[in-house]
Image (spheres, grey):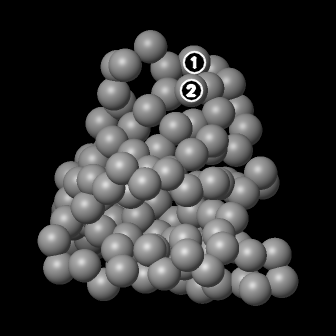
Amino acid sequence: MPRDISGSNRKLTVEGISFNVAADANFTEMVSRFENSIIPTSGKGMRKMVRRVTTTEGVVLVTNSADRATLKSFSEALDLLQLTYVNAAGDTYRCTGALEIENNETEENRTSCQLLPQDDWTLFQG
């Protein structure tokens, strides 16, 4: 059962390889599967729903050169990846998807990624 504990996520695992999450990391999740809008008409407004990917952005990892090479190979992989993360409460979420590297900061050895799930994140009851 999910717990009400806040804080940085603890760990990201891609294809069974764990990466250290930065202590101040705040994953930004687009959790809704639909973008909603109301289109004006001559009468009542018409609701428009557009399906979208539930992305997770700003995944900041503490990386060394070997980690960055591994992440690069994952971001260029043609096959979907097994993605898992553990939040501050210890809850584990899993999905299959892709990974995109947004940037790398050499001063603090941080790599920012975006996780692109094929479907929704699933809470894993472990």
**Is label 2 in a helix, a strand or a loop?**
loop
Considering only vertical position in the picture, is 89 above or below 120? above
Q: Which residue occupies 63% across, 54% down? A: 20
Is 55 on the left-hand or right-hand side of 65? Answer: left
| Residue type marked 1 | Arg
Q: Which amino acid lies under the numbered mark 2 shown in the image of this protein?
A: Gly
Can residue 63 be seen here? yes
Query: Looking at the rendering, which quadrant does residue 55 occupy?
Result: bottom left
Q: Is residue 84 positioned above or below 92 on the image?
A: below
Q: Where in the figure is residue 84, as x and y percent of width and height? A: 39, 46
Question: On the rendered image, what quadrant is the N terminus found in?
Answer: top left
**Label 2: which residue?**
90
How many residues crowd around disc 1 within 10 Å: few (fewer than 14), some, or many (20 or more)?
A: few
- Measured Cα–Cα span from mark 2 to mark 1: 8 Å
Q: Nearer the viewer, residue 31 or 81?
A: 81
Which residue extends farthest right?
Answer: 107
Residue at x 33%, y 27% (from the top left corner): 124
Dot 2 crowding, Cα within 10 Å, few <14, some 14–19, many 20+: some
> Could you say which quadrant of the image residue 35 lies in?
bottom left
Name the residue tied to disc 1: 3
Mark 2 and mark 1 residues within 8 Å of each other at the beta carbon: yes
Q: How many numbered markers are drawn?
A: 2
The one nearer the camera, 5 or 66, is 66
